[in-house]
Amino acid sequence: MKINLIKNIFKNRKKSEFIAIVIALAAASFYYRMINDFWQASSALFVLLIGLPTLITLIMIKFSKPPKTAKATVFKAITYFLLLSSILFGEGLVCIIMAAPLFYGISALIILMYKRLTSKNKSKLFSILFIPIIIVIAQPHKDILPPTVQSVQTSITFNKNVSIDAFKTQQKFKDNYPPFFKIGFPTPIDIAGVGTEIGDTRDIQFESKTKGIGTLSLKIVERDKTSVTFNVIKDTTHIGHWLTWSTIDVTLIDKGENQTEVIWVSNFTCDLGPKWYFEPIEKYAVGLMNQYLIDHYFG
């Protein structure tokens, strides 16, 4: 069986060979980023993003013992896979955190199904029920459920009068990013374009610490005295690998007594599968981004 093969690899391979592989991957990853333009701007961070998983992997190789059970074998292999992928591809901490529970959870379910199927004392019919469960959980991308537009609405009430004319000014982004952004989610760093008339555009630059800088381009398609709608015309940011933006709607409501409620609605479709797992994470991140942009323009 494949699990036994993995166990034999862990058991028979010399630790020095694993260490050599890890060091080679780290060196290749560093070299690749040195020849790219975004290396100089974030070299210290890349030392952390590549050096930290390299160090953790080396510590695991040095001090961990060969796994004795199927679950321990699979979990150890997954851990190595996630660490090595972060070294080689620089996916960053946010991607590892998002993907790890899914890897471990589905693997544990498959192991449980295998034990049921190979058990002599229990019915194998019960184990067959795990197959559709695994298919639903895995949900192959765009094969089981079509993408649906997700709407994230965020509202903040300010103790002052604000107007849609706030979009006529161009301000530097504040550096008070939410903690979720600081673990690797692309952050807005610069913006070009002003105006509130139909056809006016915005080019917002987002920086991914592992993928460089990309631009989200917006155009105003609807506008009245208290609301504006942006349509996304281009997205070259790393966020575009995870979701596809649709429209962004901003509405202002006069609450009286010098209070104004700002409602920011971002619409998108999730491009990661399984959607039941990634959609809530993306909605949480988009909600944080909504709060940040409301504070940027109206705070």
Image: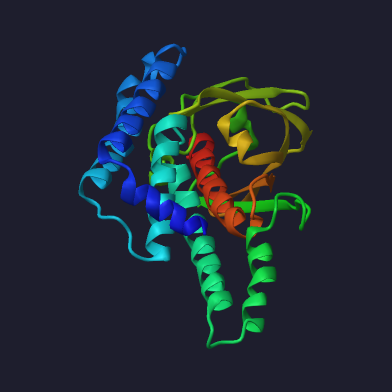
Residue 121 drawn at (x, y percent): 53, 88
| Res 83 → quadrant | top left
For residue 194, say whether it is visible: yes
Residue 228 drawn at (x, y percent): 71, 38
User: What residue sits 20% from the left and 49% below the top?
Assistant: 63
Residue 184 drawn at (x, y percent): 43, 38
Q: Is 75 drawn above or below residue 206 in the view shown?
A: below
- Observer-nearest of 167 and 106: 106
- Observer-nearest of 122 and 267: 122
For residue 170, say whether it is visible: no
Residue 235 drawn at (x, y percent): 66, 28
- Observer-nearest of 278 and 254: 278
Q: Is 282 drawn above or below residue 19 in the view shown?
A: below
- Observer-nearest of 120 and 98: 120
Give left or right: position of 120 versus 73. right
User: What residue sits 61% from the left and 30% below the top?
Assistant: 167
Count of marks, rendered view: 0
User: What residue sits 75% from the left and 53% below the top?
Assistant: 148
User: What residue sits 62% from the left and 53% below the top?
Assistant: 153
| Res 166 → quadrant | top right
